[in-house]
Amino acid sequence: MKPAAPLATLFGRLARGRGPFFLAGVVITLCMAALYVLRPTWLQFQELKLYDVTLRKKRPTIQSGLPVVVDLDEKSLTTYGQWPWPRFRVALLLARIKAAGALAVGLDIVFADPDRTSPETMRRMFREELKLDVTFDGLPAALGDYDSVLANVLADGPFVLGYYFDFSSRPGANQADATACALPALKAATLLAPKAKPAAEYLAQAPRVVCPLPRLLDAAPGAGFFNTIPDPDNIVRRSPLLLAHDGAVYPSLALTASMLALGVKNAVLRVGDGGVESLALPLPDGRRLTIPLDGRGSVLVNYRGPGGAFPHISAADVLSGAAGPETLDGKIVFLGTSAAGLMDLRATPTDRAMPGVEVHATLTDMIVTGDFLLRPDWAPGLEFCSILAVGLASAALLAWTRAVLLLIPFLGLGLGMWFGSSQALLRHNFVISPITPLLTLAANFMVLTFLKFWREERQKRFIHSAFSHYLSPVVVNELVASPDRLTLTGEEREVTVLFSDVRGFTSMSEKLTPTQVVDLLHRYLTPMTGIITSHLGTLDKFIGDAIMAFWNAPVAVPGHQAKALAAAMAMLPELDRLNQGFLETYGLRIDIGVGLHAGKARVGNFGSEDLFDYTVIGDTVNLCSRLEGLTKYYHKRILVTDSIVAAAPEGVFFQEVDRVLVKGKVEPVTIFAPLGPEEHAARERELREAAAALALYRDGRFAEALAVYEALAAAYPDPVHAIQAGRCRTLAATPPPGQWDGVFEHTSK
């Protein structure tokens, strides 16, 4: 029995099986959309890396020309000694920067401890530790305490002290509350949305702070934190402009220095339902600079390039006068270090070891120029919709199109998304991540392509296993190579049908045991099936000892009538060979009758909803079955219709046997017996005379036909002559009524 149910399953997959692939793509798309919402760490990491690549391609933007770095570089440390320097030297450095005309000076340094090199401090240490009373003759009283010297300089210039918020929550000697050291909070009016919370609740909360010396803090016009908070991969991509501590909001070093340089007295902080939205800086000339914030008081750092994008002036050159005043006049100066030994290097998207002071310089340049990287409110919605659009479109295309045809379009789509996001950043400063849509596209392509490949391989294996017993290897290979040629829904097409039956099998089987019957059938059916499949036929079914087969389905077989005829004729010598063994084993011989007819039939799965079979049905099948039954009446091993004769190849000859109307039919059919070349040559005269007698018979000249048939019956062993002689004798004695058409009607199967 053939695997009908698996065939139906295969058919469903072939005809309607694109849906599961599309549904798989939908599931993948929804999973990617869920990942986008959940934002696992690995996905964020991929987004950040793609952002870094894009930012590195960004051309240096127009700079304000205001930020300048006075660098405690290797030259300065070589010239003036290791850091920390005595505070009088720092005071001298700051005084010269102020004298050069700097608009503001931000110190990327925290002076948390008293200067131990001050003369008064040294005298106290000598007295307490060495019991020595040391004096410094000729030293002016003003230089006795270097911290006082520095405080005096700070009080007389546009200086911004730096301090550090500690998020480690591990108290230390120099850590204190911000209120304890009187850190100046942000001077800003706050605009709260109706349902918004206080600004400090949206900002990162700093538990501790490393404060400057109180006397320095009191003297300086401003102070700001210099924290840079890296991402989990330790790369600084964004930096806070505002942090919270004990319910108050504090500004960064860059923000404070910018406000001081621009003459901003009070800012305007806008707070919405989602957090801190922006900070507006009203300028003395009436203009307003607006800083867009990310809700937590931070901004993406729009780096101007790798380290060195801003002018660096060695502190040694400022102290020695080698750097002219014009290099600092009208500038916003940041005092920091690029010396590797001072450990103030930061990993950024554009430089793996950028001096931290340049981050502050970059932030100031962004504030002054208004050149911010923006993450619009609509960006998440656009990214989410892109995931759905790309995922569903790619799923549909992959479900109904070959993956190889989509490789280049998908590469183009992926490059297009990446290019679009890059241009949004490079031209409009919009940060839109394409990583999840790209991953969705890649996941759909890889998974659906794998599923299609897996299904095709499984389909090929199934086709091979399902049909290898019923079709020739050639046809099976064609189905495996082109499964689309397998049509199982049922279609009307021209087929050649073969019926064969073992004559007298019922009475013969009574002489054998059941085991012998099974063995005989196996020995008979196996080679006969091989002949059919080797001639590209499809074995339909075994009906006891009978065989039903057809040609030209499930795949087209050119010349199927000729191939079926060749198979039928090949069965006869094979049967003669088998009979030799049957005679020795069972003491008997078997004979068969074969009917062949070609015509229209319905091919497909037929049966109930649960049990069905792949077969052919129609009048063509019924006529072929009747034709096989007529082989017993005419004593012919093979009978074919004119549909087979018309398509027969050269070298095959036919004896016209009769024109009949089989039981249950209304249209007559001419039947023939095929002959090989040798038999045709040996019987040429006989066949010629038989054809003449048949012509007389059809003309209604029964007496003349009777004479010829009687002579043929006496001379030749073909039973057809005697059958026709008897029929002519009857018709001559009792002529048929009405118009004679030469058709003999069979009233039994």
Image: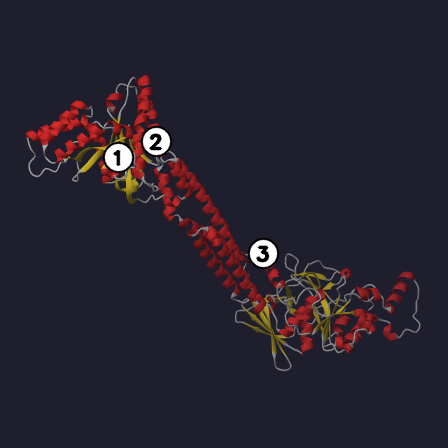
State the image quarter where residue 610 is shown: top left
Q: Residue at x 51, y 52 (%)?
A: 443
The residue that disc 1 covers is 596
The residue that disc 3 covers is 46
Residue 61 position, x and y percent, is 63, 70
Q: Quadrant of the N terminus?
A: top left
Q: CA distance from mark 1 to mark 2?
A: 15 Å
Residue 647 position, x and y percent, is 28, 39
The local crowd at label 2, few if under 14, some if 14 to 19, many if 20 or more residues have their Cα within 10 Å, is many
Q: Answer with left or right where residue 209 lies relative to residue 564.
A: right
Q: CA distance from mark 3 to mark 1?
A: 69 Å
Residue type (three-letter) at the residue carrying disc 1: Leu
Residue type (three-letter) at the residue carrying disc 2: Ile
Q: Disc 3 or 2, which lies upstream in sequence? A: 3
The residue that disc 2 covers is 531
Q: Disc 1 or 2, which lies upstream in sequence? A: 2
Camera-side residue of 8 and 241: 8
Disc 3 versus disc 1: nearer the observer:
1
**Is disc 3 in contact with disc 1, using a CB cutoff of under 8 Å?**
no
Q: Residue at x 30, y 44 (%)?
A: 490
Residue 76 position, x and y percent, is 81, 66
